[in-house]
Image (tube, grey):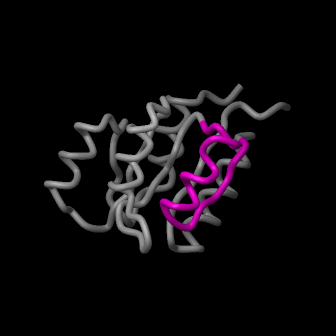
């Protein structure tokens, strides 16, 4: 079966990146990983993701700054933000920048998988 979508996972926690990588590879998506926003921006033009799963709080370049830069580049991609911090100001700003939705960490993997399947259906 061919890959059904390209997902970029951006999170500074290796365990989260690995879990999401394996989960969405099982669904036949092509998955790339980045440890922070800088790495994500470097991967963006070559990988060309259909969806980005991104942590809000990361070292070097956080999720909000990365999202702003993605939008400034006018790259059209769906973004799901993940955060362990209920920072309502940042979440409102992220919504204004067009995120699809956000998930609070720790998140329910089944819920995330279902949401991703709505965006990138499994064939």
Front residue of 111 and 100: 100
User: Relative to 30, is 89 above or below?
Assistant: below
Give percent across and percent down for residue 118: 50, 29
Q: Residue at x 72, y 49 (%)?
A: 25
User: Relative to 62, is 98 above or below?
Assistant: above
Q: Residue at x 46, y 37 (%)?
A: 73
- Please state the extent of the stretch shown in magenta in the rendering: 30-49
Front residue of 3 and 69: 69
Exactly how many numbered labels are in the figure?
A: 0
Front residue of 23 and 62: 62
Does the magenta segment cover residue 121? no
Where residue 46 sits, quadrant-wise, is top right
User: Relative to 15, is 76 above or below?
Assistant: above
Give percent across and percent down for residue 84: 32, 67
Query: For the view shown, which residue lies furthest in the left direction?
Result: 89
Left/right placement of residue 14 relative to residue 111 reads right
């Amino acid at each position: 079966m061919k890959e059904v979508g390209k997902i970029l996972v951006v999170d500074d926690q290796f365990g989260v990146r690995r879990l999401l990588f394996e989960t969405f590879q099982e669904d036949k998506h092509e998955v790339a990983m980045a440890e922070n926003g800088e790495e994500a921006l470097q991967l963006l033009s070559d990988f060309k993701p259909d969806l980005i799963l991104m942590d809000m709080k990361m070292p070097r370049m956080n999720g909000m700054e990365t999202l702003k830069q993605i939008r400034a580049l006018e790259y059209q991609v769906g973004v799901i933000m993940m955060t362990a911090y209920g920072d309502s100001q940042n979440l409102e700003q992220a919504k204004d920048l067009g995120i699809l939705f956000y998930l609070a960490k720790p998140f329910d993997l089944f819920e995330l998988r279902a949401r991703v399947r709505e965006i990138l259906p499994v064939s």
